[in-house]
Every structure is written in structure tokens, then in C-alpha cells.
Amino acid sequence: MSVKNITAITTALHLLFVIIQLPIVEVNSFSRQSTKQRQTRTTLCSTRSEEEVDVIVVGSGIGGLSCAALSAKYGLKTLCLEAHDVAGGCAHSFDRYSSASKNVPFRFDAGPSLISGLSKKSLNPLRQVLDAVGVADEIDWHTYDGWVVHDYADGQKFRLTTGTGGEWEKAIEEKAGKDARYAFEKFRSDMKVVSNASGFIPPFALRGDASAIGSLSKYMLKLLSIGTKGALLTGPFTACMEKYSLKESFNVKWFDYLAFALSGLDAAHTQGAAVAYMMNDLHDEGAVLDYPMGGMGSLIDTLVSGLNKNNGELRVNSRVDKFILSGEKKPECEGVVLEDGTIIRARKGVKLGEHSKVVVDTVNEIQEEAKNFQMTGSFMHLHLGIPSDGLEEIECHYSVLNMDEDITAKQNLVIISIPTVFDPSLAPEGYHIVHAYTAASEDFEEWQKFLEDESGSDTTKIGNRPSTGKAQQYGKMEGYDELKNIRAEALWKAIEQIIPDIRDRAEAEGAIKMVGTPLTHRRYNMRHRGTYGPAPPVGKDVWELQGALTIRSVWYNCSQFSGRSTAADGTNEGIEKEWCPAIIHKAN
């Protein structure tokens, strides 16, 4: 399998259905690797002169680790580089201790915690990667059937239940009436052909060369069977709603919510294939949601295991400072230079995974165009460890919003997870962990001032390793803590809809309370302005961005930079979307 083929598969990981949660905690100590990950064969960066491997993968998020594990599986000497002191990117777990226990930590999920399609063999691209590298059975999954939505507009709560038992349809009728139920049932039926088509091509059938003719041939009849409806997969999901005349108020709001929870964008900006795929994932017979016992870090540990068992290497605390380019008209990436001066050359290629931003003269024009992108917002986060007494009836996942307001309105949607409902071992006995966040709706402008010194320069450049003092400098700025507490108020209010005495519990003996801001997100994920990613302008095809850049070139052409380096990013289909505009080339 070629580097192109591996990249095609890993970019298909965007079809992983994950309601996104991005890191993060504002603290002075740094994320500890989970016990299992500390035992795997990772190495810390130390000063060396020069070395050579077949493939370099920059970033160890889910996409980067999948790429690295596959590369190693097919016999390539693979090195995965991570700037942070722990692997996992947005999906890592981290430990914090309190007086509740000296031996058992609170183990928080920094990122995603609502997943489907991983507990058994499926079309989910990440599950296919786990199967391919031989580690799928290393994860113990808890399966469950839904989450609760609290609507500020009328004070009602209702539950999304997966599967075909009719519970969700009954919930719609109780919430919005019979017309809303009938509208959903008709739309789901009308969409069945499109939803099925979204899974016609298994990710491992994708290729970046002439062999695609053979690997895709067996699926052509299925693709042709949907005719012109195939265009609905690449356009915005609102095109599907218009095609099948879905106008009923509750359902229009519901699919805006579902699209936003998935992509950080409303239905007009979210790819039709993503939401169509998710409709099958939620409403097919036997559909379930999955949570990895041990926290999301156990999924990362498993990917690291897949890399290690095939003689690949993960190297943490290894920030890439420069990319080595050769040639002028069509520069090729031949390797990297680490922050400590170590030179690592790649015989086959360099893959940019998560947490990567490149600045080179050859792509200044593209960077300028990237500045004009319409960007999604950033995030506020609240991580809590609280006493669990009296909370026996709560569920793991909640969404709190005002469905009468624009789904993209500032701090409208808050998503809450309490994974100790499934796995009590994630906290000391008698405690729960709670994670709440505002989804891609925070304005970065009000935080910008904490990055600038008196001269107006940015004092914490993206690219500093998260654990350095320089990277944390903004936290010492006057007014930062005050603004942080003000912006966290929406999170406290949302959790109060589920746990009315949450503030008292957060002050109890042994409790933990941590607030993260857009600057924390920027710091740990190296995200421009703490954003979730670029978005297409209103009225444009969902793949299309301003200027000469397109998401299509990123995903389908894998952003080949003279065939030697690739990147993937966007705001559709889940969590693994990192913005690397410097190596995205102009679409043909």
C-alpha cells in the first residue's frame, strides 16, 4: 500500500461520527499520559544531529496515529512526532489528583466522548483502521442508546433514542406534535437511498492512483443506482431538506442542531453525506453509541499499540520547527527540523496530521488567502470532579440549548458529558467527572488582547510546546481570570439544568474545578485563533472556500504538495480537522 493510499484512508476518518469536544483545561500542571500509554514504546525528543526514516507523521491525534499505524503496518519505517507531552491531540485523556484520593485520579476526556460505529465491525473508517492494524479487540466498549436534550425555549427535556424501536418518534410527538413526527418519518424514508449511498464505498477501497479503477469497480453499480441524487452527498444538507420538502419547524431546528453538534456549522454549511451517514448510524436497526472503558485515552493507547506492534515509533515533546523543502517552482518536503535542531529526513514522505502549522515563503500567497476564510468560533470548557451522591439517575450525555435561537448564536449550545456514569473507575470512589463546553461559538476577538505585549506583538506564538512557560504567559495577564469566569457562566447554567446544586458540589471536599478558554484551545491544539476550522460562505457548495483553495483539494486530492506532504482539514464529519493552510495547494 502506497503513502497515497494510506493518506486517502486516513482522510476518510472524517466520516467518524463524533460530537466534538476539544481540549481543554487551564492549569499550571500538564496532561499526564494514561498508565497504559506510559508503558508503550514512546520516546522523548533528545538532541541528535540527523536521522532518516521512510515516513514522518506530524501530530498524534486520531488521524495522525491512524496514518502512522497504517504506514508501519505496511512495512514503512514510520516516526510520529508530537509537540505535546502526551499523544492523542483533541482525543487524549489526562489525570488530576485531589484530596479525594492519593491513589486514584480523576481521568478527564480532553476531547470526544460520544462515538458510534466502533464497538463492532462497520464502515466507520476508524474501526477499519483498528481492524487493519490488529488492535480492535484491545478496547472494551460500553454501548448505550442515546442522549438527552434540554430546550431553554420551553423548559422541556426530550431524549434521542437510537435504533428502530419508535422511542425517538414518540419523543418528537411529545415535544412538537404529530405533524412533527410524521414529517420526520417521511423525511427519514425519503432520505434512505441517500443515507445508504453515503456508506456505499468503504474507506479502504479508496486509492490515490490508477488502482482506484479496480478497488472501486465493485461499487460502481451501487453509486450509479442513486443517479442525480448523488449530488446531495457533496452539497449542504439543506439541499436534502429542500429536495424532500422538509419544512416543519421542529425538524428544521433539529437538523440544524444535529449538523452543528457534528461539524460546528449549521445544516446550510454541513456536508450532506455527513448528516445522511449519521441518520443511518442513529436510526438503523440495532444502532448504538459507544464509549471506551478507561476513557478516550484508551482509544489513543490502542492506536499507539497498533503503531508500536508494527515497529513504528511515537516521539512526544518533539515539536517540528521547520519543514525541509527542496526545489523552487514545485518544492518537495524532504523532512523536518525539530525545535532542538534535530534533522529527520523522510525517504517516502511527510504527512501532516493534527496540531501542525507550516510557515514557508513558498506558500505566502496561500496563507494570505487563508486569512480571508470564514472561520468557525472557538470554545469554552469546564472540567469538574464532584461528589456523586444523589445522582444515581443521571445519564452520560446532554445537550442544552434554546431551539428558538440560531444554533450558531454565541454560547447557545452547551454539550455535557458525565462518563463516570458508564465507568466509575475514571474518578475516585463516590465522585463523578463532568465536562461541559460551548460548541464552536466563542468569539476570539475578546481574548486577543491577552496575547499581545505593549508593542502589540503576539507573545505566545502558535507552535510553542504547550508545556512551556511562554505558551502559558497569557494566563498571567491582568483581566484574564475575570473574563474566563464571566464566559464560563453559560456552562455552569447549563449544568444546573441537570445537576441543580453543581456549584456547591464543585466546592466540596475533594472536588476539582478547571476552566478552559479559546486561548487554552489555541495553546494545546495550535489552532489559529482557537478556531474549529474554515467554513464555506453562505450559498456556496459545502466543499468550497474563498479564493483558490477548496476543501475538496484537501480531502479528495489529499493536498499533495508535489507528492511529498499532505494535510487534511475542514469543519465536517467530526473531530480530526486541523488547519494547515501553508501546505494546502491551489485546486486545479
Image (tube, rainbow, N blue to C red):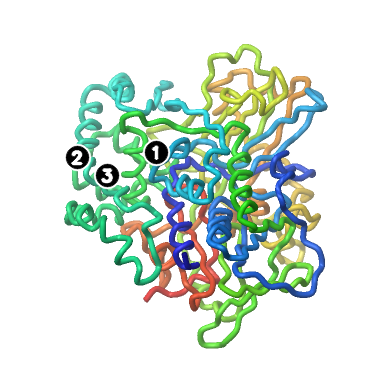
Position in image of residue 156 (x %, y %): 41, 21
Residue at x 39%, y 33% (from the top left corner)? 403
Front residue of 370 and 59: 59
Q: Which residue corresponds to mark 2?
A: 190
Find numbered disc 1 in the image and state the secondary structure of the residue it sits on. helix
Find numbered disc 3 in the image and state the secondary structure of the residue it sits on. helix
Give the farthest residue toward the top.
390
Q: Residues within 10 Å of mark 2 (few under 14, many from 20)?
A: some
Pointer 3 with pointer 2, Cβ within 8 A: no
Q: Is residue 7 left or right of residue 138?
A: left
Position in image of residue 475 (x %, y %): 75, 48
Q: Which residue corresponds to mark 1?
A: 257
Residue at x 57%, y 55% (from the top left corner)? 69
Pointer 2 with pointer 1, Cβ within 8 A: no
Q: Is residue 392 left or right of residue 263?
A: right
- Identity of the amino acid at label 3? Asn
Mark 2 or mark 3, which is nearer the start of the sequence?
2
Q: Is residue 176 at all visible to an observer of this figure?
A: yes
Q: Which residue corresponds to mark 3?
A: 196
State the separation of the CA atoms marked 3 and 2. 11 Å
Mark 1 or mark 2, which is nearer the start of the sequence?
2
Residue 23 figure quarter: top right
Front residue of 160 and 267: 160
